[in-house]
Amino acid sequence: MNHESSSPPRWLARCFGLLCLPVAFGAAASWQGNHSVPRGCNEEVRQVVSMGSSKAALVGDFTVCGGLPVQRIVGYDFSRAAFYKLGVGSDASVSAVAELEPTAAAYDPSSRRLYVAARRSNQLTLGYVDGANALTVVADQAGPTMLGDPRDIVLGDNGRLYVGSVQTVIEVNPAASWAQRRLGAESLVSSGRSIYALEYDRQRARVVIGGEFSAIQGVAAANLAEWNGSAWQPIEAPLDGNGLDGPVYALESVFGGNGGLTDGLYIGGEFTGSVNALIELHNITRFNGFGYNGIGTGLSNRGLRGGAVRGLALSSARTQLYAVGEFATAGTTRTVNGVAAWDGGAWSHFDSLDLAGLGLDPEPRSVTEVGGRLLVGGRVYSSGPLRVNHVAYYSSGAWRPLGDSIGQGLVGGTNLIVHRGNPSRVNFGDALMLIEMEAFGLQASKGALRWDRFTRSFTPIAATTPDVPSFADGCGDPGGPMFHVFSGNRDPFVAAGVSGAHGILDLEHMDWLQGSNLLADQCVMSGVLGKLYMAQYDDDANSTDLIEYDPLSRARRSIGLISGSIRSMVVDETNLDLYIAGDLSNAGGVGAGNVARYDMLAGSWHSLGGPAEGFGMNGRVDVIAVADSGPYVYFGGEFSMAGGRAQPALARWNRDAETWDAMPSLCELMVRNCPGIFVQLFALQPLSTDELVVGGNFEVEGGGHGLLWFDGDAWREGFAGGVFNSRGDGGGVTQMLLDEHELTVLGSFSRVGQAADARAASSIARFDLNNLGAEPPAPRPELVFRSGMEP
């Protein structure tokens, strides 16, 4: 954007609280700190692929690995101990392969090609990264339809490639202009069933699938099937029956095994035997061409129960079969903890020579060997005291991380989700942010992140109780060290000594306490009154009961029935008012145009404006913020009118004058229709009397994303571009926290800033407000670590 004025932002010329902010311009970076991901990636690594003696490809749900914003795929060079972008070629500055968002990969050592597969418009898109690290797309939405994203790619000895999804298998022939042929129907297994694994059985020259199903195209087949050249059929085992008694997650063909490793098709999953139950198999077996053999006494949890095998791989010397999964033991006694190797006669484990760590916790899912190193990906966070993020390797007698140990980005487990809305304040001005996460950098954290105002640093929430409840909503006590949490989907807590839907985390001692038996979809607390306000939505009646609860006396009372649903609640501690917003038409008997105010002292409900003003807004309101100084309460959402006048997406209520005060429309800066589903506001942060920062999911003219600043007179971009996903075409902010001159933003993004200010940031970043509105630094070429395949 073009900022003609050279004067500093108005709010910087004033004092904020007790702090007078200096005005700083020049080349200083606006985005502060290192919020990359140490020792791995920010979300699950689903597949690890060896690319010779020193390189590997990782595929998964991640968007940041180390200091690189990436999109589901990244390379790692062990010789340089660095992640690098795949498919960038010799001249490109961004990862072209990220445009595919691949979900499966396979490496062909003979051609030195890494094949990558994705699904677009229900058709296969296939490409390969060559020895020059350049991407070539060979098939793009030109073949038969497929159901679900690709899960596996395998290379057949016949020169064909096979790509499997949750329901479909497609054969690709590189020698025939990459022609595609679907093997059987689009949907091979019945609805609700899945294909998990695909392999080419080299001993029998058959394509084999494993999964969780009872039939393949109507023919009985228990979790295993093979392609006979013209049709799918169960694997023939006359004595054992037509498959296994539980799901199959991994397949590995061994043909030409060395040492004592026997040839055959090795199968991993969660089963106890074949259909006919002739012998116990315990999650791993070998099909020898006629039936199933046990592999020792199998892999399981203690007591030969549970413990699924998720991944299998053959060592480069063909002397060992590696297995990873959720098992704890090999046989009945040998502890292996998720990672084991079979040499044909016995199982072995992988622990550090100093016994600091044994195996990996909690869910290894994929394994390969890279130049003698055992590389494992999955949902893995530790080996003993060693912390890692979703990936690790074993070498020279110890488990080791990928990448360096620097960075304080957010790390997810099954998901990485920052909840929408304002951070919850607790005593001494600290704040808690609700996040579905597993770690902050290398520190374990469950459900929330705490901002310590005294040390001006983030502290993970890690209660001393080992079983931490998984909560969906929560709110802090501004007057004390208590954090109230509520279970999701109305399921009661069954952990940490807490029963029922409401638990309390004592932040001083980091212990869980028993709460009430109340349910809540939203909550907020007044530190002045010591009261907790909880919204209980009734889906059948489309109404919400708002409950006032006293944690000390345990007294409770309904303060009003709300017609519709509440999406945001905020307490104005100065005037002791509770503001609610959402999709609602009546609050406690008064008209509510999706917003309303409750006087907590008088116990009365009030409309924001009269009938002429529509009692508020003409559309849903998603977020509220109360300014600490000045008269304004801000509302953001999908509305076009506020107070009876055109005021799209964002409006302000003057609580002193009890009027809706006009302000310039932020929609003038939006690239897409505003308001609407493509312009969503999730977080609001007042700065001074009439200045405001807006966070959400939107694109701004000039290429910015996710953040806008109202300087009191006009809307400006002001954040050096804002936040971005790894493709650079999106990114959203769902929470903001102001502390002195720094604004912390959290949301769905993997990079912040543009030009010289650009840096990786895994869903959290800090902006120096001294540089708000300053001209961005001069552009620079993006630094990309370019590295081809093995020479």
Image (cartoon, rainbow, N blue to C red):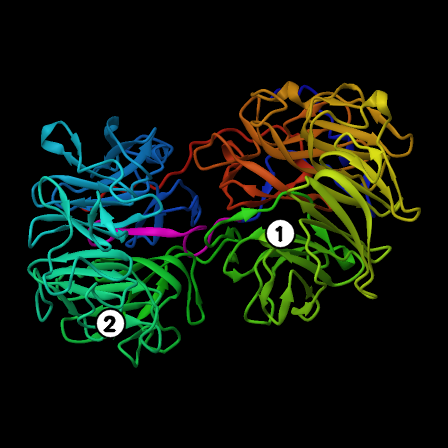
Q: Is residue 620 left or right of residue 126?
A: right
> Is residue 566 at least partly visible in the picture?
no
| Quadrant for the C terminus in the image | top left
Q: Is residue 56 above or below residue 731?
A: below
Residue 477 location (% of width, % of height)? 76, 58
Amino acid type for the residue under numbered disc 1: Leu
Badge 2 marks a residue whose secondary structure is loop
Which quadrant holds the N terminus? top right
Label located before the other in sequence (2 or 1): 2
Q: Nearer the viewer, residue 767 or 510?
A: 510
Residue displayed at 37% across by 39% down: 784
Q: Which mark is residue 434?
A: 1
Question: In the rendered view, would you say 694 is above or below 289?
Answer: above
Assess whether residue 52 is covered by the magenta stretch: yes
Identify which residue, 571 or 445, lies in the foreground. Answer: 571
Mark 2 vs 1: CB contact within 8 A: no
Crowdedness near tag 1: few (<14), some (14–19) or many (≥20) residues, C-alpha within 10 Å: many
Q: Which mark is residue 54?
A: none
Residue at x-position 59% and y-position 27%: 679
Query: Residue 359, relative to residue 712: is it above or below?
Result: below
What is the C-alpha distance between the residues marked 2 and 1?
Answer: 41 Å
Image quadrant in which you'd find residue 236: bottom left
Q: Position of residue 197 (x, y in %)?
A: 25, 51
Q: Could you tell me the amino acid type at mark 2? A: Gly
Tell how many labels. 2
Q: Secondary structure at mark 1?
A: strand
Task: Write the residue at 71% across / 51% down.
Answer: 424
Segment colored magenta: 35-56
In the image, residue 284 lies at what x, y percent? 23, 66
According to the image, label 2 marks what residue? Answer: 298
Residue 367: x and y in percent read 27, 58
